[in-house]
Amino acid sequence: MTLAIPHARVSNTPDPRVQHTGPASSTKRPLPSVAGSRLTVPLVDGRRVQYANLDHAASAPCLDEVQDAVNELLPWYASVHRGAGFASQVSTKIYEQARTVVREFVGARRTDEVIFTRNTTDALNLLARALPANTSVIVFDTDHHAALLPWRGPNVHRVTPTAQVERDLDEALAKTPVGPRLVVVTGAANVTGELWPVARLAAVARRHGARVVLDAAQLAPHRPVDVRELDVDYVVLSGHKLYAPFGAGALVGRADWLRAAYPYLVGGGATRQVTERAVSWHLGPERHEAGSPNVVGAHALAVACQTLGQHWDTIIAHEEALLDRLRAGLAGIPGVRQLSIFSDDAPRVGVVSFTVEGHDPGLVAAYLSAEHGIGVRDGAFCAHIAVHRLTGGRALRASLGLGSTAEHVDRLLTALRDLVIHGTDVRYELVDGRFAPVDDPRPLPPFLTARGQ
Ligand code: PLP
């Protein structure tokens, strides 16, 4: 089903620069494994089943390779940039090497800055603070709140994307005053998984002398990203969506605005010298990284980047097969409507949002968890404008990744079919705003209860 964005019957042809542009040397290898793939969860009827994690778009499970690398690092864990001790030197080296790996992962220019952040939200807020005075910002109103909201002031222009999204951008840029301009482009929509025509939008921005920041939070786990090929100025991403859930993300891009900006965080590490009278700040990435850096997170992110970079062919093939299975299956269930911003046949990553006629998305999500051991997301996915426009309310989202299997997809489809035909087996109530089974008997894991929770 196509969405309800006004005029939005689009033929959004694939952007060849975003899709399948993996390194030429990428050879087919086995799919990287993730932690939790044998996790079992309790059901309301007392059984335990393997957890069907269909919520990769929110936070992806940890790659086994990342977990091993973190375990290997931990004995060496020490202060970064602050100690003469051998372990400190090792930790510092690991941290700085991680910058190089992330730079290569996104195909950044030699002169680009690589700044470690907490996540994509943090990275976009950092960039927002670093914009030169009076920068005009153009952002699409269907974007994730992390991309939509950090920009402040009178020069922020929100554009509603239509079928002719390049024309939309062109018109918006033509109306913005001369001066620094930044266009915010999402790589893959977190609501629908649709791939945005990043390279084509960047070309429009270039014609107007505007810079582009690519929100790759949802794209980078699914497709190679190449800053130079796409011709974007900045890219932001999150480790926890890239199978590296250790609290690091990154902002990569042009150094000039970042070097000229007042530090994002102020404190130790960002300073070159502090006297009674003055402070001088570093010019490089440390300028915006005050405080003890997250070396574990940065290393985890780097290992995830390396691992994904070596497996793109397999990752994409795995996901596309499951996505086809999921979308075809959903299309066969009465009352299920899949959401699209551009069009139903727009190219997309393994993220599918949908509604089930007559069923509250929150209740469906609770039912899938309690009666089938399936994890999906429900609500408006931090993209309220997009989801409200597409549904008038809320939706469900199933998102695929390295932890997904055909059995997970089939279980979801069977459960939804059962729901539509028979309804739920147990009763549900609202508890603190979320649906839960009445008298939920499912036990929490022992390690949690042992800690008194
Ligand atoms: N951008 C997109 C497209 C997203 O999907 C998300 C998270 O879902 C974000 C930004 C924000 O990412 P984070 O919560 O890691 O900061």
Image (cartoon, rainbow, N blue to C red):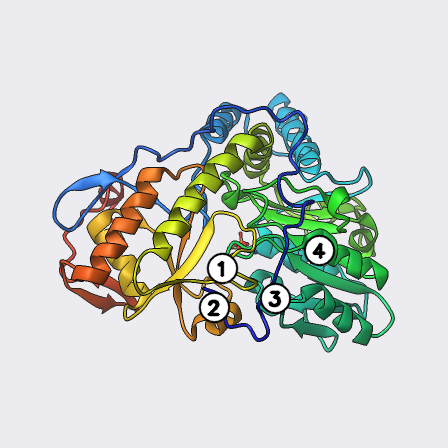
Which sits earlier in the primary sequence, circle 2 or circle 3?
Answer: 3
CA–CA distance in space, label 4 to label 3: 12 Å
CA–CA distance in space, label 1 to label 3: 14 Å
Disc 4 residue type (three-letter): Val
Which sits earlier in the primary sequence, circle 4 or circle 1?
Answer: 1
Q: Residue 148: which disc?
A: 3
Disc 1 residue type (three-letter): Val
CA–CA distance in space, label 2 to label 3: 14 Å
Q: Residues within 10 Å of mark 1 (few under 14, many from 20)?
A: many
Q: Residue 145: which disc?
A: none
Residue at image position (58%, 64%) is 143
Element on which disc 2 rests: helix
Rendered view: 409 above or below 420: above
Q: Of circles 2 and 4, which is in front?
A: 2
In contact (CB < 8 Å): disc 1 and disc 3: no
When asked about the image quadrant of residue 304, the answer is top right
Q: How crowded is mark 3: few (under 14 residues within 10 Å), some or many (20 or more)?
A: some
In contact (CB < 8 Å): disc 1 and disc 2: yes
Q: Residues within 10 Å of mark 2 (few under 14, many from 20)?
A: many
Which sits earlier in the primary sequence, circle 4 or circle 3?
Answer: 3
Foreground residue, 17 or 249?
17
For ligand 1, tell me if the residue under mark 1 lies within 8 Å: no
Which residue is the site of mark 4? 213
Which residue is the site of mark 2? 387
Foreground residue, 90 or 136?
136
Q: Residue 191: which disc?
A: 1
Element on which disc 3 rests: helix
